[in-house]
Image (cartoon, grey):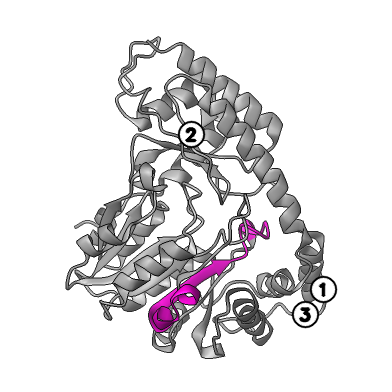
Amino acid sequence: MNIVADRLSRIKPSMTVGINTKANALRAEGKDILVLAAGEPDFDTPVNIREAAIKAMNEGLTRYVPGKGTPALQNAIINKFKKENNLEYSSDEIMVGVGGKHIIYNAMMATLNPGDEVIIPAPYWVSYPDIVLLAEGKPVIVKCSEKNDFKLTPYELEKFITPKTKWLFLNSPSNPTGSVYSKEDLMHLGQILLKYPNIYILTDDIYEKIIYDKQKFNTIAETVPELKNRTLTLNGVSKAYCMTGWRLGYCGAPKEIISGMNKIQSQSNSSTSSISMAASVEALQGNQDFIEKHNIAFKKRRDLVVEKLNSIDGISCGIPPGAFYVYPNCEGIIGRKTPGGIILDSDEKFMNYLLESRGVAGVQGEAFGLSPYFRLSYATSEKILIEACQRIDEACKLLK
């Protein structure tokens, strides 16, 4: 008798976690590895946020807290949504989880029945399909063309809708491409969704504040208000506030969805840390000036990486307007042969070649559902980025 549950056969381990684990193992062996695989800002959590956490600890706020968030945090989230997104939520329409991934997991577990379909535009964040599969749903992957900036078009959306469609996932700015849906993009998608009242929308806005080139962030429940009563608007403090390790995500959604998510959470992890909640109140309500400073640094790094990658034979890279990733096309590399005689017939083999021969860790496009591409994070120092691009260039020049 197999001790492992059958449901695990439906999913695979996170490829991004696996690559980081492999890269760190090589580092532990003493090898010089440059890791551009992690979706994590290299800036420290701002001082005012850390001080709010210390204050909470010193004041004894170390006991159980409501799973859906302390009253102070709920109010901070409600005010954030109203002030920044023109979205009004009551306290029973707010949920707090252990990071954004946990919010998505709770939502899918609370709403999906076996066979329910979830439309997921590709490239997608690696965990979307597997969370759907864990909840016994069916991911319906829609491959989005680079010609359309990797964004879902209204035609593609309607083409993949069936009577079993229950959710559509949107992610803007996108991980892995950095693409941003404009107000017009969302309005056009919204017009299709208004024709199908049984479809819910999960919009992952975690990179909302990391945006460049005078782009404006828009979210679908604000852009198409008629969809708010069937939209889950997801956000969190990990990226813009440099709080990846604090593990706090949040969302606004219809009461019945939040109620179901709370029921799931009450029987699983209960809540995230009380200290993380206190720190997140300060993050949402405190000084925001550091975000613009970080974005200036990210933009400079982005421009550096895009320029250097586009100078490498076989690689082409667009300019992402948001997040902190590039998603270069490596079609010109596919089919070439390494000095050791290995034919690089996939983006996965190309990434393995870069890691093993030059110590550069990136993530293959296969992990995000669209090849032949790869993802590099530029949320690290310029020195590391310059060295990494030089190593990639050297590796590619050795290919035949």
Secondary structure state at the residue bearing disc 2 = loop
* Residue under label 3: 60
The answer to whether residue 63 is above or below residue 352 is below
In the image, is 292 to the left or to the right of 218?
right
Distance Cα–Cα, label 2 vs label 3: 50 Å
Which range of residues does the magenta coloring cover? 221-245
Going 72% across and 70% down the picture, which residue do you hit? 279
Position of the C terminus by quadrant: top left
Q: Which of marks 1 and 2 is in front?
A: 2
Q: Residue 207: give x, y in percent of width and height.
A: 56, 58
Seen from the viewer's position, the closer of residues 119 and 147 is 147
Distance Cα–Cα, label 1 vs label 2: 45 Å
Q: Which of marks 3 and 1 is in front?
A: 1
* Residue under label 2: 317
Position of the N terminus by quadrant: bottom left
Which amino acid type is shown beneath numbered disc 3?
A: Gly
* Residue under label 1: 55
The answer to whether residue 275 is above or below residue 5 is below
Which amino acid type is shown beneath numbered disc 2?
A: Cys
Furthest residue toward left: 163
